[in-house]
Amino acid sequence: MKPNVGFIGLGLMGRPMVANLLKAGFPVAVWNRTAARAAELVKSGARLASSPRNAAESADVLITIVSDPPALEQVLWGEAGALQGLRRGSTYLDSSTVSPLLARRIAAACAERGVKFLDAPVTGGTWGAEKGELVFMVGGESSSLAEVEPVLGALGKRWFHLGGNGAGQTVKLAMNMILALQVDALAEALALVAGAGLAGEKLVEVLQSSMARSSVLDVKAPMLLKRDYPPSFPLRLMHKDLGLALDLANQIGVALPATAAAREIYNAVKGAAKDDLDYAAVGQFWQKP
């Protein structure tokens, strides 16, 4: 018999993740701050929970994926918060991207209730969520991870056990730093080529056959060339993640000069943006109207 899953957070990633759980036959209770986002999932068989606590109460495995640390804290410790509903022996898996410090705080709160906790942020974008091909970076007990592998199998293609609680979040922040820097560098290089009077497509064509090739090119280069940025990984979230990485670096005494410079560029574009854009919109820093 498949375990009952509670799922909180039905944004760009959460909705397709729940759809895959339902396709795999898991009973799922869902909650989202904007209940209307659950409508299609309810039609497909999900139960709409009345609160985060209600989503957690019947869950053998609870999954959260929300936008930032304040949103996660509200879901867990706010009115009718999920922590109040988690049952002893259940497993809580957080796939939001937050700080390692918050992950360890949640782990301590779960331990007090006899709940197993895994910080398990994801990579793969909306396309990975839709295809069930996400990659999970997991911090926590290996035995807890083994218990939820059937659930992860409906959502992702790989998961890595990286250490104790907080390790998943640490690796996720480091990886997002690299993605942010890669796209920032690509946008800057395209600006240089365009400024010299050449088509950006020429640069991308060479990059795809060189050591500088990266799979991120396949997704982000077309956006930059078309100047069209529908949000797969929103700029506001990448900006948030760069801030979390810099906060962690300050805590442990590691200098991140390239990340600090990139965050200033992302910050400038975010401040000027009127829409919810993909983080490839960092290219607007160099683009003239």
Image (cartoon, helix red, strand yellow):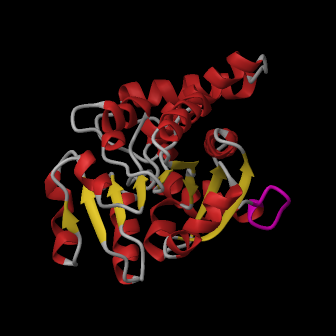
Q: Residue 208: percent from the left, percent from the top?
A: 74, 65
Location of the N terminus (image quadrant): bottom left
The residue at the point 37 percent across, 59 percent down is 14
Q: Nearer the viewer, residue 36 or 271?
A: 36
Q: Is residue 257 visible?
A: yes
The span picked out in magenta is 207-213
Q: Main secondary structure of the magenta part?
A: loop
The answer to which image quadrant residue 6 occupies is bottom left
Q: Quadrant of residue 248?
A: top right
In the displayed structure, does residue 149 sit left or right of residue 170? left
147 or 98, nearer to the observer: 147
Quadrant occupied by the C terminus: top left
Residue 199 visible (yes or no): no
- Which residue is at the front of the view, 238 or 275? 238
Asked whether residue 106 is drawn in magenta, I would say: no
Left or right of 256? Residue 179 is left
Residue 211 counted in the magenta span:
yes
Pinpoint residue 265: horizontal percent, then vertical percent. 55, 27
Q: How many marks?
A: 0
x and y percent of residue 239 in the render? Answer: 50, 32
The answer to which of 271 and 49 lies nearer the viewer is: 49
Q: Residue at image x 85%, y 59%? A: 211
Say above or below: 48 vs 65. below
